[in-house]
Amino acid sequence: MARHFRPVVVGVLVTTSAALLGLGPTAVPASAATNSFRGVNWADERDNFVDGTLVLGGLSTSDSYATTQSKADKILSGFQNNLGANTVRMPVNYSTVSGSYWNSYTGAIDKATGKGMKVILSYWEGDSSRDGKVDNLTQFWSMWQTIVNKYSGNGNVYFEPMNEPHGYSATDWKNLAAQWLGKYPGVPKGRIVISGIGYNQGLTTIGDDSRFNGTLISRHLYQFFDTSRHTEASWSSALTDSVGSYAGRVIMDEWGAPMTDGRNYDAASASDDFVNYIRGVSAAARTLGIGTVYWPGVRPNDHYRIQNINGSGTNISLSTTNASGRDRLRYSWGL
């Protein structure tokens, strides 16, 4: 999403725990660490807040399943070869899943899992609402039932019930997320990604709720979330302090900064807040063993994108927009 153009209210239910860098005694991790998630977001050029059908960069609603697979193979291979990625996060909504294009859209999901990649499927609300709530609960449950029926048996597919549920109170979001777990008990807890409160910021309140024991927890972190931070150390603290004792369950599945304007993220800066943000957050993720999923890997015309699409049709390839940004992304992954 073009999240970098939107103001955000900061300070949502974050617990300071600077001394806790890993797992505390109360944590119930899905794994000892999440750094096996090395990923990027593959997004719609219009942003993933779409009232109709989602169309990922490089794809078209006129594409058949086979054509989608052919295009997806080139894009996913670019993520793997250029970045070392093994995870891709993709949006879903009711219009996409309930319509005829779903048969083609699944070609991209199937190609990713066929290439051994993890796929995180996350629900986005429509553009006309943008209120941080599910647009239509009847359609929401129908959409997820279709997805769960198709992919619950595929160990490489992960389910994120909602992206940035900022319209709900902490209690209401947790109740809705718990309802999701109750409706789809056949989905293993370790393949469910529960968004933090607000804009995926409040993590410990999810971790502290025993209903979510064993699930993963999603964190989003952008420079514009807190423009008072100006140093690498302060940005490292922004991630470290927010995870509390639940680092072993947290995936930072959105973070990003400008990649098309020539910034050098390999060198420390005394004045560039974006450089300090990328360096500080990547260092903390590496130390904590937290998996990260960059926003975006591919989204045409987004100046945060870390990959360009070259060519057209099925004759496409990817290239890296910023080598230093790629370096820091890989650094966050522990590579």
Image (cartoon, helix red, strand yellow):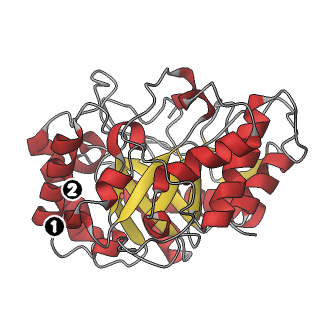
Q: Position of residue 26 (x, y in %)?
A: 35, 71
Query: Does the rendering let one see residue 310?
Result: no
Residue type (three-letter) at the residue carrying disc 2: Trp
Element assignment for label 2: helix
Q: Are marks 1 and 2 in contact (CB under 8 Å)?
A: yes
Give residue 184's mark.
Answer: 1
Outermost residue toward the right?
A: 267
Horizontal side of residue 34 vs 335, given as left or right: left
- Number of residue marks: 2
Q: Position of residue 90 (x, y in %)?
A: 45, 52
The residue located at (47%, 55%) in the rendering is 243
Q: Mark 1 belongs to which amino acid?
A: Tyr
> Is residue 255 placed above or below 258 in the rendered structure?
below
Mark 1 or mark 2: which comes first in sequence?
2
Q: Which mark is residue 144?
A: 2
Residue 264 found in image quarter: top right
Residue extending farthest to the front is: 19
What residue is shown at x 85% (from left), y 48% (from top)?
324
Q: Nearer the viewer, residue 303 or 217?
A: 217
